[in-house]
């Protein structure tokens, strides 16, 4: 059975009850912040440590994004230590530049945190909101709070509804095929995920079109092939990475509607004065296909207008960009407008750890993304990683996030300077 559409959600028939609905447990409605009414523990931050790591991808595991190829995976591990021996872990997005993140935290943020109580995470997050660098510290503070209260983080975040730690995951891929090589790899990939037990997949539009003679007219048959291959009961999501024009999106939208796609993600750029109106036009062109976005937005204020003016049906904040505190607020605002929160979740296991805790806790939960590219930072750095079985993931029911790092990972994965991507040397030259 396919997931509820935007129309069914807005009509009040969504699978997940909204705040204030008759199905919502009254006890959960009284807290306007996860820590309201939670007794503070006497803790002080003693140190904040940033460790940056890398894994060079062998050629057969490199993946494509437009005109570039990803040659390595990076990790910005954040560890926060307290005077009572309780420590927390988190991750800040490596796409912000591991060297730059480490420098900002070491020189600017860390000195302001020494002696602070991690239970003041709301105030600490507000002080650094918008920098992006603080995100992993915020997540690590929540790990400490959960451990100090002997409670899983997802239960602390569940202020509006009974939490659900059994999460439906979707396979996020479509970055391993090339238009200039063997585009059939995309179809094979989708069938592989279905065989593994996933019930949904998101895919991208492939290597740079201009270099391979691709056009929207040539692309649409591949979209139809995807639907035919996986069948009608498998959810498909189209990710554009903001590479299409509004005109192209308005041409593609009726096809996605016809093929009963689940959502259309970041179809056009969002940095232009008319971007929001463009998203509204795309939504109107595919009334049963949800439109999603927001992975690079850093706080609730970045999302506010887009939520209120119906630019998105699904908001996609990422805890390694916003932090978990701000992400909770974004999800709550979206819920008040009857919109799903389905976090962007493309990096390592430390990011999945935080995003999964949020999804388990919120009333407008839906699915959680899982990056399908090979990345040892997803599972291989933990003693007890989060794993997917038949399309579902169970969040650990342990204090904090319930995850412990393996010893020696910094030595195993030494940092490699430079951007995670480089120009794709195999991309055909422009005609």
Image (cartoon, rainbow, N blue to C red):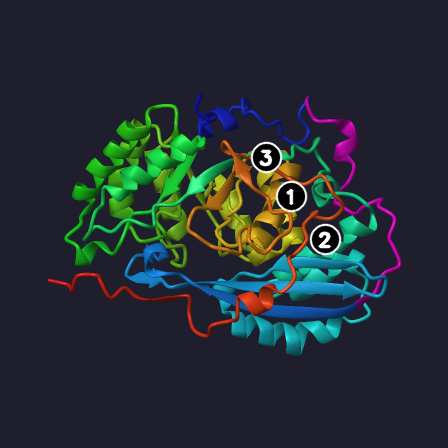
- Relative depth, front residue between 431 and 419: 419
Q: Position of residue 394 (x, y in %)?
A: 61, 36
Q: Position of residue 78 (x, y in %)?
A: 64, 64
Give neighbour class at mark 3: few <14, some 14-19, many 20+ (Cα, 10 Å). many
Looking at the image, residue 294 sits to the left or right of residue 69; the answer is right
Tag 3 residue: 364
- Looking at the image, which is closer to me, 352 or 279? 352
Q: Quote the CA–CA distance across marks 3 and 1.
A: 13 Å
Distance between the alpha carbons at the discs numbered 2 and 3: 21 Å
| Picture coordinates of residue 415, whole percent (x, y) | 51, 71
Residue denoted by label 1: 357
Label 3's element?
loop
Which residues, given as a range, are shown in magenta? 23-45
Viewport quadrant of the C terminus? bottom left
How crowded pointer 1 is (Cα within 10 Å; few <14, some 14-19, many 20+) is rated as many
- The answer for how far apart the CA atoms under marks 2 and 1 are is 10 Å
Q: Residue at x 54, y 25 (%)?
A: 14
Asked if disc 2 and disc 1 are in contact, CB closer than 8 Å, the reply is yes
Report the side of 410 relative to 175 (left or right).
right
Between tags 3 and 1, which lies in front?
A: 1
* Quadrant in which the N terminus appears: top left
Mark 2 or 3 closer to N-term?
2
Q: Of 155 and 424, which appears nearest the observer?
A: 424
Direction from residue 152 to residue 240 in the image, left or right: left
- Residue linked to disc 2: 142
């Amino acid at each position: 059975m396919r997931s509820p559409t935007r129309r069914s959600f807005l009509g009040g028939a969504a699978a997940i009850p909204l705040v204030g609905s008759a199905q919502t447990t009254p006890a959960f409605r009284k807290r306007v912040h996860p820590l309201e009414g939670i007794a503070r523990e006497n803790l002080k931050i003693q140190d904040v440590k940033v460790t940056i790591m890398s894994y060079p991808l062998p050629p057969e595991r490199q993946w494509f994004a437009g005109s570039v190829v990803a040659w390595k995976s990076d990790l910005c591990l954040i560890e926060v230590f307290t005077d009572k021996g309780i420590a927390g872990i988190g991750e800040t997005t490596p796409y912000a530049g591991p060297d730059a993140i480490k420098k900002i935290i070491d020189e600017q943020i860390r000195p302001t945190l020494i002696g602070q109580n991690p239970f003041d995470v709301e105030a600490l997050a507000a002080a650094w909101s918008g920098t992006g660098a603080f995100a992993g510290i915020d997540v690590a503070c929540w790990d400490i709070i959960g451990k100090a209260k002997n409670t899983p983080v997802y239960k602390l975040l569940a202020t509006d509804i009974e939490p659900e730690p059994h999460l439906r995951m979707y396979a996020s891929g479509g970055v391993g095929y090339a238009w200039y090589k063997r585009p059939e790899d995309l179809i094979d990939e989708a069938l592989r995920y279905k065989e593994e037990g996933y019930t949904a997949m998101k895919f991208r539009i492939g290597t740079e079109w201009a270099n391979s003679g691709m056009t929207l007219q040539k692309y649409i048959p591949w979209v139809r092939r995807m639907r035919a291959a996986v069948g009608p009961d498998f959810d498909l999501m189209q990710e554009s990475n903001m590479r299409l024009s509004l005109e192209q999106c308005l041409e593609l939208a009726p096809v996605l509607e016809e093929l009963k796609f689940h959502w259309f993600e970041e179809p056009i750029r969002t940095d232009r004065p008319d971007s929001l109106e463009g998203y509204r036009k795309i939504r109107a062109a595919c009334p049963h296909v949800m439109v999603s976005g927001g992975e690079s937005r850093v706080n609730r204020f970045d999302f506010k207008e887009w939520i209120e003016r119906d630019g998105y049906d699904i908001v996609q904040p990422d805890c390694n960009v916003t932090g978990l505190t701000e992400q909770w607020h974004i999800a709550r605002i979206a819920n008040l407008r009857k919109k799903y929160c389905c976090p962007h979740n493309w990096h390592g296991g430390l990011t999945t750890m935080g995003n999964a805790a949020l999804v388990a806790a919120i009333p407008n939960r839906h699915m959680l993304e899982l990056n399908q590219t090979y990345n040892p930072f997803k599972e291989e750095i933990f003693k007890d990683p989060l794993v997917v079985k038949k399309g579902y993931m169970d969040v650990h029911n342990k204090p904090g996030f319930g995850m412990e790092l393996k010893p020696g990972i910094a030595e195993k994965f030494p940092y490699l300077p430079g951007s995670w991507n480089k120009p794709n040397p195999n991309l055909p030259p422009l005609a």
